[in-house]
Amino acid sequence: MQIFKTVKEVQEYLTKFNTKSIGFVATMGALHEAHFSLIERSKEENDITVCSIFVNPKQFNKKEDLIKYPRNVDADLDGLRKVGCDIAFVPSVEEMYPAKVQKEFDFGLLSEVMEGEHRPGHFNGVAIVIERFFEILNPTRAYFGEKDYQQLAVIKSLVEKLNSSVKIVGCPIFREKNGLAMSSRNERLSTEEKELAGEISKALKFVSTNRDTHTISELKNWFSNKMNEHELFDLEYFEIADEASLKPINNWLGSEKQIAFTAVNLNGVRLIDNMTIIN
């Protein structure tokens, strides 16, 4: 595996593969099995796979969250070697943003609800860094996990706005044995907290399978009450939204396909998850 820290180095290396397809996986490190599954998918579908490790300060609306974000580059690189990644791109903040970036994207409702409402500026920061990566690497395909479903929708919209040829590939959520959606933030949980966090996906599963017997209001109340049963949980939001527009809905007639979305703080660690409603 080749490791590069500068834009010049990685671009010079990639010029060798002008006729090859390039798969790209953007990460902020603290890699886990879900990340490695994206690498494996990219390896299956492309000639060359590039994984970035970069904790992007522009997508954190809280400074303390940026400071606490788990970092272990050496372990990440070992994991990438084991999974057979071709290139690791590990730039500094100065390398990614050599000049001040003051760009504002408008994604409409996609970036205003749920995560957008609770994390002001987050998706603009995501768009800035993804556009920068696309400029540097010029990938054929880019792979993103569906745990961050709203982010995936925003990135698809970004590609349209940029008139980019990059194909965005969404990949299924990877879960722990107890159902907890895999996330880098899980590293901050104790063993007991990880076990408790599995209750989030169990509650989502109840919601996803009870469309026919409950109204949306009833399911939202049920989910909220379920989270409140545990004193370590602090429910930030729970919404049932249209799959395409991500607009939260109040009745089943307003949408053909729906997804349940939630963000729950567990003893100070913010966990997000989603699950498709079964019709």
Image (cartoon, rainbow, N blue to C red):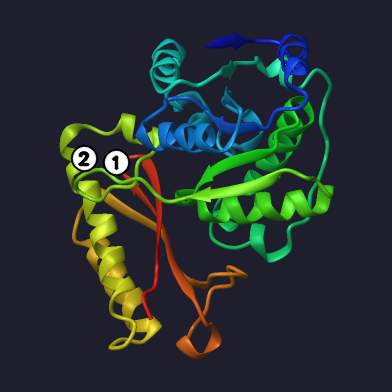
- Pick the residue in front: 229 or 157: 157
Residue ranking furthest to the front: 19
Q: Residue at x 84, y 21 (%)?
A: 99
- Figure check: 127 above or below 228: above
Q: Secondary structure at mark 1?
A: loop
Q: CA distance from mark 2 to mark 1?
A: 8 Å
Q: Say which quarter of the image contains residue 25.
A: top right
Residue hosting label 2: 193
- Pick the residue in front: 16 or 99: 16
Indicate the amino acid at tag 2: Glu
Indicate the amino acid at tag 1: Asn
Q: Dividing the image into 4 quarters, which one contains the C terminus?
A: bottom left
**What label sits on residue 67 in the rendered view?**
none
User: Residue 89 at x, y = what percent?
Assistant: 61, 18
Q: With 97 as the anchor, is 118 left or right in this view?
A: left
Q: Residue at x 71, y 14 (%)?
A: 10
- Figure check: 163 above or below 69: below
- Pick the residue in front: 73 or 21: 21
Residue hosting label 1: 267
- Figure check: 220 above or below 143: below
Q: With 167 as the anchor, is 81 left or right in this view?
A: left
The tag earlier along the polypeptide, 2 or 1, is 2
